[in-house]
Amino acid sequence: MRISFIISLFIITYSANAQVKLLTLDELDNRFAKGKDTTYIVNFWATWCSPCVAELPNFEKIRVAHAKQPVKVLLISLDFKSKLQKEVNPFVAKNGIKTEVFLLNEPDQQKYIERIEGKWSGAIPATLFVKKKVRRFYEKEFTETELKNALLNLK
């Protein structure tokens, strides 16, 4: 009985840490506006995208390396909203992702693609760097070195 109680507590605690929140583009823009001195690295990904999944550890490493600096890494899943509880949250928990993870809550794919970056084809992985008024958008898979260089060259 005790063992099952302890296991239940562990599962509840573990899954509570992996709660992915819904996020609209207005909320993302508000976050950019409030963090005037913060550099944002926003990665658009999905659980079904192999290159996306392959690069996620690189974003974790960047988050850890810049934990004491005004750099925020945000992972925004483009999975369907209906997949949040059964696929996205378990994926985040299973992979031990500590970076802030959101699921994009926008109904019109074409509108959000154009709003994020007019030249974006919609392919993922894709990453947006935002530092004050400077925005750089990349439609590619990043290595850790490429991420570091993109961050350093953001002016």
Image (spheres, rainbow, N blue to C red):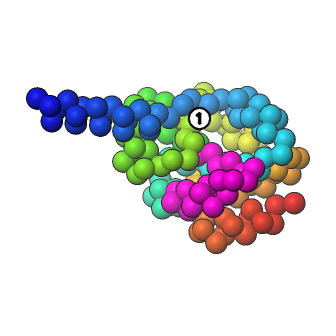
Query: Compared to 126, does 6 lie above or below?
Result: above
Q: Amino acid at mark 1?
A: Leu
Tell me, yes or no, if residue 126 can be seen here: no
- Residue pushed farthest left? 1
- Where residue 61 sits: x, y (%)? 57, 61
Which residue corresponds to mark 1? 104
Circle 1: element type = strand
Q: Which residue appears at 47% of the width and 49% of the height?
A: 97
Q: Which residue appears at 87% of the width and 60% of the height?
A: 155
Pick the front one: 79 or 66: 66
- Image check: 4 left or right of 153? left
Span colored in magenta: 56-75
Q: Quadrant of the N terminus?
A: top left
Q: Which residue appears at 77% of the width and 31% of the height?
A: 30
- Image check: 86 left or right of 44? left
- Where residue 149 sits: x, y (%)? 73, 69
Q: Is residue 79 magenta?
A: no
Q: Please rate how many residues cluster around mark 1, counting C-alpha atoms within 10 Å: few if below 14, some from 14 to 19, many from 20.
A: many
- Where residue 111 sits: x, y (%)? 70, 34
Query: Compared to 150, does 90 lie above or below?
Result: above
Which of the 4 quarters of the picture holds residue 15?
Answer: top left
Tell me, yes or no, if residue 36 can be seen here: yes
Q: Which residue appears at 65% of the width and 53% of the height?
A: 67
- Image check: 94 left or right of 106? left
Pick the front one: 131 or 67: 67
**How many callouts does the rendering have?**
1
Query: Compared to 75, does 33 lie above or below?
Result: above
- Where residue 78 sits: x, y (%)? 55, 41
- Residue pushed farthest bottom? 145
